[in-house]
Amino acid sequence: MQVQPVYKRRKRSKYEIIHDILSNCQNGAKKTWVMYRANLSYDLTTNYINELMKNGLIENRDGIFVTTEKGKQLLELLEKWMKINSESTALLNQIKQYLPEPDQDTENKNEQANPQN
């Protein structure tokens, strides 16, 4: 029996979700398309779409959601932010090769063995 590796999916930030929605709406998208492509529940999709419409970042054109010019400007900023964020994560991983973080279990045992009161 072959054991499948377990991949821990990282929780996306609000900005990453907004990026996904704005990106999907650039050429127009129905709500269900946005929901599936952004991997969101119906309720979350509705909440995000309402927030983005309220802020003038997307608009509803006969059931098709389209990214506005203001939304495209935000999308550009989010893409820059995501690139910087990705680069800083890669840099942090390189740093951790030199300064590995202590194992949490080992750290807890050391604290219990040597309490500093």
Image (spheres, helix red, strand yellow):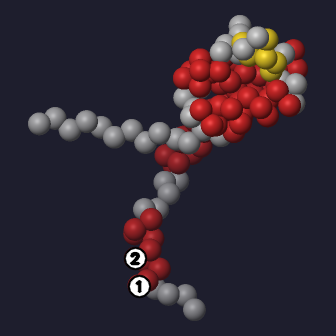
Q: Image quadrant of residue 26?
A: top right
Residue 113, labelled with which disc? 1
What kind of residue is marked 1? Ala
Instruction: Estimate the x, y position of residue 40 in percent, counting from the top left.
Output: 57, 32
In the image, residue 89 sits, relative to residue 58, either above or below, namely: below
Residue furthest to the front = 62
Circles 2 and 1: CB atoms closer than 8 Å: yes
Distance from Cα at disc 2 to Cα at disc 1:
6 Å
Residue furthest to the top = 27
Q: Tell me the SS state at disc 2.
A: helix
Q: Nearer the viewer, residue 85 or 91?
A: 85
Q: Nearer the viewer, residue 57 or 88?
A: 57
Q: Tell me the SS state at disc 1.
A: helix
The residue depicted at 59 percent of the width and 25 percent of the height is 35
Q: Nearer the viewer, residue 101 or 26?
A: 26
Instruction: Estimate the x, y position of residue 79 in percent, counting from the top left.
Output: 72, 24
Instruction: Estimate the x, y position of residue 3 in percent, counting from the top left.
Output: 20, 38
The residue depicted at 65 percent of the width and 15 percent of the height is 30
Residue 109, labelled with which disc? 2
Instruction: Estimate the x, y position of residue 65 in percent, counting from the top left.
Output: 74, 16
Residue 7 located left or right of residue 60: left
What kind of residue is marked 2? Lys
In the image, residue 107 sits, relative to residue 16, either above or below, namely: below
Residue furthest to the left = 1
